[in-house]
């Protein structure tokens, strides 16, 4: 039924055995998670009134939810009685990373890539709402691009976002590329037709390259990483000041990122080497 969420089957006996139990999401839990999203993606500090206006809930409800989140470390209240995101999500993210196979495999290769290119390196993975930064290695150079772990990158802007977008099913891409896509810089491509053209190009060449589309003055190259099921599960990218990504240097940078992505994929594939075949990645 609408509004219901399926859960995994529970152990049952009798005539109900084997059925999938469906339950309506708990409203308090749902609201608490919405507040966490607002604290994570809104202004750095939000008051009860701000959150009440954003959600349409009463101040009393918002206040009680915030106090509960504060108790468990998901929210922090400052002296002005405004709230910001607590450290608990960061702790959970760290635990996810520690348990992530791709992160464990990729980390040493990312360090080598940063050393060989002199640029910042970022590991990303697709989520339901965009692309998330799983890990980063800063460039050793003083002038560099910095990427924040946990940052969610839009599908249509930047090399990592566009790369992951290109390897989604066509139907999902069609859902994402609707008119009115947000513009982040004067170079952000928002026209669905132009984005489709770039998607075709990315699938053919096996990498994405953008300049200043998400962050002004930042260029990046992104290459896919595949797992044992031969699916694109992550991507490795290098990024830095656009002035350093000049045309004569691009082939070298692309080759280095390709090598890193291939090394990570090989380890995820148990030693078998991946082969890029146009719009699909196989072994």
Image (cartoon, rainbow, N blue to C red):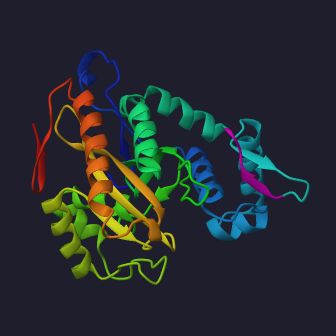
Q: Where is residue 201 shown, x and y percent of the image?
A: 17, 68
Residue in the image at 29% along x and 32% along y = 20
Residue in the image at 31% along x and 62% along y = 250
Q: Which residues are magenta?
A: 82-87
Residue 259 in the image: above or below residue 243: above
Any part of residue 14 in sight:
yes
Viewer-closest of 249 and 125: 249
Residue 229 in the image: above or below residue 211: above
Viewer-closest of 22 and 112: 112
Q: Where is residue 63 shown, x and y percent of the image?
A: 77, 54
Residue in the image at 24% along x and 80% along y = 194
Residue in the image at 42% along x and 37% along y = 112
Question: Does the stretch in magenta take in 83?
Answer: yes
Q: Where is residue 199 shown, x and y percent of the image?
A: 21, 67
Could you tell me which quadrant the C terminus lies in? top left
Report the side of 82 relative to 55 (left or right): right
Residue 156 in the image: above or below residue 181: above
Any part of residue 24 in sight:
no
Q: How many marks?
A: 0
Report the side of 119 relative to 207 (left or right): right
């Amino acid at each position: 039924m609408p509004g219901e969420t399926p859960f995994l089957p529970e152990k049952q006996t009798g005539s109900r055995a084997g059925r999938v139990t469906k339950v309506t999401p708990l409203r308090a839990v749902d609201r608490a998670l919405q507040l966490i999203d607002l604290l994570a993606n809104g202004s750095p500090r939000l008051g009860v009134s701000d959150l009440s206006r954003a959600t349409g809930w009463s101040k009393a409800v918002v206040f009680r939810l915030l106090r509960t989140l504060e108790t468990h470390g998901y929210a922090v209240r400052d002296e002005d009685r405004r709230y910001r995101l607590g450290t608990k999500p960061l702790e959970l993210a760290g635990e996810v990373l520690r348990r992530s196979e791709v992160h464990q495999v990729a980390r040493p290769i990312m360090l080598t890539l940063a050393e060989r290119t002199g640029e910042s390196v970022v590991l990303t993975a697709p989520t339901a709402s965009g692309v998330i930064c799983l890990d980063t290695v800063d460039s050793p150079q003083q002038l560099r691009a910095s990427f924040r772990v946990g940052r969610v990158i839009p599908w249509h802007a930047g090399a990592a976002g566009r790369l992951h977008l290109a390897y989604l099913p066509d139907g999902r891409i069609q859902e994402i590329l609707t008119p009115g896509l947000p513009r982040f810089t004067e170079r952000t491509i928002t026209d669905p037709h132009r984005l489709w053209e770039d998607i075709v190009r990315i699938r053919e060449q096996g990498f994405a390259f953008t300049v200043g589309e998400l962050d002004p003055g930042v260029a990046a190259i992104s290459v896919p990483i595949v797992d044992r099921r031969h699916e694109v599960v992550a991507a490795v990218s290098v990024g830095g000041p656009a002035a350093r990504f000049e045309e004569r240097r691009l082939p070298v940078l692309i080759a280095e990122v390709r090598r890193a992505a291939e090394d990570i994929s090989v380890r995820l594939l148990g030693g078998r080497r991946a082969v890029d075949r146009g719009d699909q990645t196989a072994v």
